Amino acid sequence: MTAPLQSYPFTMKRTLNFGAGPAILPLSVLSQASKAVLEIDGSGMSILEISHRGDLYEQIHNETKERILKLLELPTESYTVLFLGGGASLQFSMVPMNLLRPGDTADYVNTGEWSTKAINEAKRYGNINVAASSELEKFSSIPTQFEFSEKARYCHLTLNNTIEGTQWNCLPQTKRVPLVGDLSSELFSRKLDFARFGVIYAGAQKNAGPAGVTVVIIRKEMLTGIPSDLPTMLSYQTHAKGNSLYNTPPVFAIYVMGLVCQWIEEQGGIGGMEKQNEEKARLIYGALDSREDLFETVVKRREDRSRMNITFRLKDANHEKIFLKRTGELGMEGLKGHRSVGGLRASIYNAFPLEGAKLLSQFVMEFRV
Ligand SMILES: Cc1ncc(COP(=O)(O)O)c(C=O)c1O
């Protein structure tokens, strides 16, 4: 390699983890979590050992719920937070099971592999109207024309499409129909009109913490009319009534999510995060666009480009191996695209450092084969 980065005064202490999830976490959070693994709050016990019914955990649990609603600027009177298992994938079933009654219709917009999975699960429980789809363009854009049904119970969107690298930049107009959002790969990364959502769900392992907890933020009025014959553990009612303590919650994952929320507050809240995320994305897309001789972005329409997952290719696919080898030598890992689409992908979630985005953009600008 012809030392392309000598001009760049940056030495890495940690691997620059561009992985799509589980993903990079703030070092300060990891440091505090590692102390809590040995002992939490002078209790003489590890966070991994304390009872989920004790005062110490109860405080962590309730504070984390409060922090989540505060970050999203949602009022506690009308919204509640649930901590569930089963990943975002279980929400593909729980959402329609809980929100649809016999004969009901829900609108879904198909923007990628995860939306398709959500649609396929929902079809088991009600009439599903696919109001728009970008499948014919291999999900490389966000639809702009919709055919919403007259009386949908909700409209489901995947806000950020982790695999394809697209992101909704404005919410579609659904009149009074509440949105249900899969925010798995963008939770807490930017400001949105969250009050338009009846349900927001996300696996924590990208922007909000470690794997093991799924956060569901639900408008309280959506809890009325949930079918009473659902399996106990699959009913939002069970978890809302039991303050997500009906069964043993993933204590450690929730604890770390609470630390991540505090860290986001220190960054200036979601607004502060959004600025940093925009800057990181600007640097990397800017570099890719300036190297059209060798590189191409998968998402052509700029307004559809994800600020979380940047998907790109080398025009000659044989050069991708070289790219991955050299970035690996510089401590940049996780840049291989999702196995179903190939190519390359840089995931730059909240905790991904600006210096890392600078390093990748400089690398792209100086790349020679
Ligand atoms: C947008 C989106 N939805 C759902 C999922 C599935 O999440 P989980 O693995 O938590 O079930 C993922 C995982 O990458 C995702 O990116």
Image (cartoon, rainbow, N blue to C red):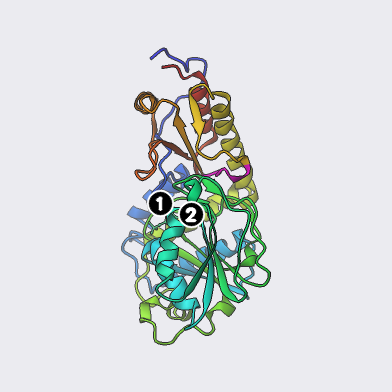
Q: Secondary structure at mark 2?
A: helix
The residue depicted at 63 percent of the width and 46 percent of the height is 272
Residue 71 part of the magenta-drawn span: no
Is 14 situated above or below 254? above
Residue placed farthest to the bottom in the image? 228
Residue 23 percent location from the top left of the image: 41, 46
Earlier along the polypeptide chain: callout 2 or callout 1?
1
Please name the residue shown 61% across and 72% down the image: 76
The residue at which mark 1 appears reads as: 33
Report whether 154 appears left or right of 247.
right
The location of residue 350, given as percent across then percent down, is: 52, 45
Q: Is residue 323 left or right of residue 129?
A: left
Report x, y in % for residue 251.
38, 64
* Residue 283 shows up from this direction: yes
Which amino acid type is marked by label 2? Answer: Leu
From what the image shows, is residue 127 above or below residue 358?
below
Residue holding disc 2:
259
Q: Which segment did they paint magenta?
A: 303-308
Q: Quadrant of residue 192?
A: bottom right
Residue 179 place in picture, x, y as percent:
59, 66
10 Å crowding of disc 2: few (<14), some (14-19), many (20+)? many
Quadrant assignment for ligand 1:
bottom left
Q: Which residue is at a point 35% across and 81% down the rendered structure image?
A: 231
Quadrant of the frame with the C terminus: top left
Q: Are marks 2 and 1 in contact (CB under 8 Å)?
A: yes
Residue extending farthest to the front is 136
Residue type highlighted by circle 1: Ala
Q: Quadrant of the N terminus?
A: top left
Q: Tell me, yes or no, if residue 41 can be seen here.
A: no
Q: Residue furthest left?
A: 49
Q: Choose between 159 and 25: the one closer to the eye.
A: 159
